[in-house]
Amino acid sequence: MTLVAGVDTSTQSCKVLIVEAATGATVREGRAPHPDGTSVDPAAWWAAFIAAVDEAGGLADVEAIAVGGQQHGLVALDAEGRVVRDALLWNDTRSAAAAADLVAEVGAAAYAACTGSVPVASFTATKLRWMRDHEPHLVPTIAAVALPHDWLTWRLRGYGPLGESPLGPVLDELVTDRSDASGTAYWSPASGEYDLELFALALGRPAREADPHGASAGNAVILPRVLQPADWVTVDAATPSLRGSRAGVLVGPGAGDNAAAALGLGAGPGDVVISIGTSGTVFAVSPEPVTDESGTVAGFADAAGDFLPLVATLNAARVLDSVAGLLGVDHDGLADLALAAEPGAGGVVLLPYFDGERTPNLPDATATLSGLTLTSTTRENLARAAIEGMLCGLADGLDAIARHGLHPRRLLLVGGAARSRAVPAIASAVLGLPVVVPEPGEYVARGAARQAAGVLLGASPEWPLALHASVEHPSQPQVRAAYAAAFARSGH
C-alpha cells in the first residue's frame, strides 16, 4: 500500500491526513490546535505540525506530501530565516486603510487586470503596505516574504531559521503554488508571473522570484518560486523532531485552502462549491481567468491549472446560530421549524447583515427583518427566513460568478451548516440547482493529499466522493425576488 500525506495548516489548527494514494482511503490522521489571534508567531504552526504528525503516527511510510492552508497571510523573514514580526493572518483587518490606499493609487480596474482581483484587507500586499507605513524600521530587515503554507513547506523540507533547522535559511528554496500566489495581489493568474512593480508599490522594496540555483539580485526581497500543478520538490534533509521525516520524500506545490478543498472534492467545470461556516464562500472551477473590477469576485487561480473565481460573505452559519438562540432551539429544532414553513416564509425576509457585509460591501450595515404581520410572525417563518436570507446572500455571490460566463450545473455544499436537514433542501429551491452534500471530512487536507498522490503517480488520481445527501427541489424564484425588494427598501 502506497501512502501519501496531506496537511491543512488553517487558522484554527493543523490537520494531517494520511491516505492510500490510489484510492484516497484514509489510513490515519492527526490534529493539533493553533493559537487564537489575527497575528501569530509561525513557530506555533511548526509545533502544531510536529504534534499533528505525531498523532497521525509519523511520516516514515509516506512517499509524498503536500500542504494546504490559510490564504493571504504575511510571513516576513530576515536573512537568517527568522520571522521579522508575527505573521499577519488573512483575518487581520488593520490593513483596511492600506488596501484603500493601494486601490486609489493603482485603480480598481488596473488591479483587476493585473492580478485578477481588487485587494481588500485580507490580501498580502495590503499587509506589506501596512508594515511600510506603520513599522518602517522593520522593512529594511525583510529578506523574503512567504505565505503560511509556503513557510511550512520550507520547514518540512529541512530549511528554516539559522541554528534551528538542518539546512538553515536557504531562502531561495522557498516555493509556493498558483492558487496561493493569486491571493497576494502581486501575482497574475493570467500571465503566471509576479507583478514586481505592484510588490514594490506595496512595500517600497524591489523583489525577485526565488532561484534554487542561487542567482544574486542585491537587495531584492525574495518571493517563493511558483510551482506548476505537476511540479514537485523534495525533503532535502530529515528533521529529527519531525517523526518519520526522511530525505527524498516528494513534496507537492501545496495550495490555498479553497483550492485544496476543490481538489479534495473533485470539483470540475460546472461545479460550484458553497462553504457555509463562520463566513460563507462561493467558488467555481473555470477554464479561463476571471477579472472583476467591482471587487465582488476574486479571480484566483486553482491548484490544478485552471482558475477559481470566488466570492466571500461575512454572514453565514452564525446567522443560524443567532436565530436558533433567539427561538430557544438547537440546530435540529431550527431545521424542523424552517421545514414546517412555506417557501417565502409568509413574506418575512431577513437581510442577515449582523456583522456588516463584505459582499455586498456594507461594512457598517446591520441586519433587517421585514414583512412581519400578526399572521406571518411565527417561529416557523422566522426560522425559514433566517435560512433563506443567508442563502440569498450566497446566491448573489453565485450570480456574480455566473456573470463571468460560468454555467453552474450543480452545487457542492460543505461546512457545518450543510449538515442541517433544512439547508440543502432550501438551498436547492433558492439557488435553482441540484445540491450535493458530501460526507463530513477534512477536504483541504484531502485535497493536499490528492495533490501529493498526483506528483507521486504522475497524474492526479480519481478518488470517489462519499455523499451525505443529494437533493433537488423546484426553484422558488419568489424568495429571491422578495429578498431583492427588501434590500431595495433598506436603502443600502
Image (cartoon, rainbow, N blue to C red):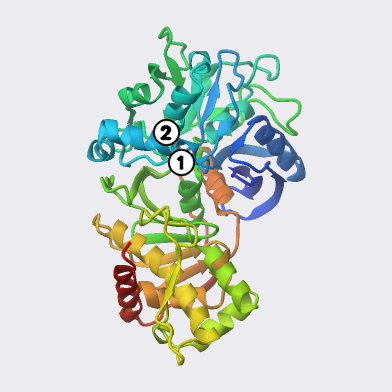
| Image x and y of residue 35, in percent | 68, 41
Residue closest to the eye, 455 or 160: 160
Q: Amino acid at mark 1?
A: Ser
* Residue 467 in view in this figure: no
Displayed quadrant of residue 65? top right
- Residue 450, horizontal then vertical, whole percent: 53, 47
Q: Residue at x 58, y 68 (%)?
A: 322
Which residue, given by chain and number where applicable, does mark 2 sit on? 126
Q: Is residue 72 left or right of residue 305?
A: right
Q: Quadrant of residue 110?
A: top left
In the displayed structure, does residue 154 sit left or right of residue 198? right
2 and 1 marks in contact (CB < 8 Å): yes
Residue 170: x %, y % from top left = 56, 16
In the picture of the structure, the residue carrying the numbered disc 1 is 122
Q: Residue at x 35, y 57 (%)?
A: 360
Rendered residue at 37%/66% (across/down):
395
Q: Secondary structure at mark 2?
A: helix
Which amino acid lies under the numbered mark 2 shown in the image of this protein?
A: Thr
Residue at disc 1, secondary structure: loop
Labelled disc at residue 391: none
Location of residue 22 with respect to 492 vertically, above or below: above
Residue 476 visible in rendering:
yes
* Viewer-closest of 16 and 485: 485
User: Looking at this view, is 74 or 81 the one in front?
Assistant: 74
Spatial separation of the CA atoms under disc 2 and disc 1: 7 Å
Categorize mark 2 by other alpha carbons within 10 Å: few (<14), some (14-19), many (20+): many
Query: Which sits in the foreground, 476 or 59?
Result: 476
Decide: few, some or many residues near mark 1? Use Cα within 10 Å; few <14, some 14-19, many ≥20: many
In this rendering, the answer to whether 410 lies above or below 85 is: below
Instruction: Say whether residue 158 is left or right of residue 106.
Output: right
